[in-house]
Amino acid sequence: MAGRVAAERWFGDWFGGRPEQLWVAPGRANLIGEHTDYNQGWVLPFALDLGVTVAAGRRRDGMLAIRSRQAPGAPADLPLAALAPGAVTGWAAYPAGVAWALREDGHPLAGGASLAVDSDLPEGAGLSSSAALECAAALALDGLHGLDLPRPRLATLAQRAENDFVGVPSGIMDQSASLLCQAGHALLLDCRSGETTTVPLDPAGAGLALLIIDTGARHALGDGRYAQRRDECDRAAAALGVSSLREVTSLAAVAGLADPVLRRRARHVITENERVAETVALLTGGDLAGVGAVLRASHISLRDDFEVSWPEADVAVDAATAAGALGARMMGGGFGGSALALVPAGQRTVGAAVTAEFAGRGWPPPGFIQAVPSAGALRLR
Ligand code: GLA
């Protein structure tokens, strides 16, 4: 929250004057539907009440000037005309990539822009801080230059920035969640058609809470293992003669894959798509508690079939479940970041149990965030 107010003040300190527009784009949690987005399947994320704020103003010198409270020693002053993949590294590549993707899409952003960035979202925790930064920058650049592009289009351009400018092969889930979610709801996204449906998600109303456990293990989607999973899924789809694993609905077909690794990867994607549908049915029927078992099954599938879990997540999930969570699972791309647990509201034993298990292994204490399904990106001014 503090960042939302501060970005406006920092704009004045860094660039002089007041910003013309102020935007906040949230991070996300994913209730279920992991590693399904780039397989053209379904995902069910929700927006967090934590995000990236961008205070923005137009310029006349053709520059994109970006400053961040989180990277005080690394200001970026980039001639818009010179933006090209590989030309910018570090945090500034995300907003610069968005300007590049807009330009490539036919929106040159004449004159340029000044962007002051602040965030209350932990980085590397698997809560999509990079997508939030892209989306806040996309809305600010779109707004300043009067483009008025539809949000699904901005999500696609933000993803393009990440894929082609930054060089991280992520799917469309995180940007869609940040731009399209509604408060009190999860977002069911069909990643093939782009169709979205809001699904009521009210943990407090069910006497429950969604607890994010930041395991402290840091992940980077660019480290090659995420891309390797994408490649394995593409190879499984090719071996099955379909354009994406979304087309496969029968596990019997998967059993025919010769390569046991591809068999496991495909089995995860197919069963995870089923779990999304099951979760939507449970939520629609008012049975959030019933989702606990589905979260548990998702974790086992991500751990054993997709093999993207990590030791801290496995320990957090097992300890949370043993201490009374209705279900828990690793969340996001994997290999680090956060887990998500569905717990009785007001109950402290789950957090205490996870903390104790971490301490027993000599690991730093995990962080906890109560996840409240919140609104997608907003213009604040
Ligand atoms: C990361 C990516 C998403 C998605 C998840 C796994 O968060 O950015 O596109 O693939 O991993 O579900």
Image (tube, rainbow, N blue to C red):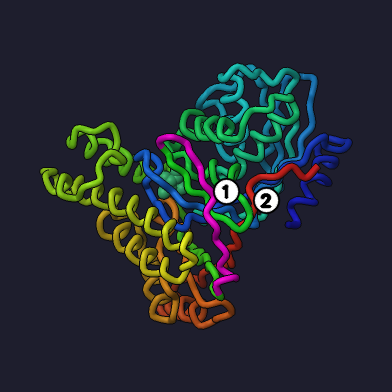
- Check disc 2 and give the amino acid type: Ser
Q: Residue furthest front?
A: 285
- Marking on residue 129: 1
The dot on residue 119 is 2
Q: Is residue 303 magenta?
A: no
Residue appearing at x 54%, y 22% in the figure: 84
Quadrant showing the N terminus: bottom right
Q: Is mark 2 within 8 Å of ligand 1?
A: no
Q: Between marks 2 and 1, how big is the CA–CA gap?
A: 8 Å
Q: Is residue 164 visible?
A: yes
The residue closer to the viewer here, 260 or 287, is 287
Q: Secondary structure at mark 1?
A: helix
Mark 1: amino acid:
Ser
User: For this view, does 115 lie left or right of residue 220?
Assistant: right
Q: Which residues are magenta?
A: 192-206
Of residues 124 and 21, which is closer to you in this image? 21
Where does the image place residue 216, in percent across and percent down from the top left? 49, 63
> Which of marks 1 and 2 precedes in the sequence?
2
State whether residue 315 is above or below residue 226. below
Instruction: Find residue 33 and report its horizontal and vertical position in percent.
Output: 40, 52
In the visual, does 28 lie left or right of 191?
A: right
| Residue at 30% over, 60% down | 303
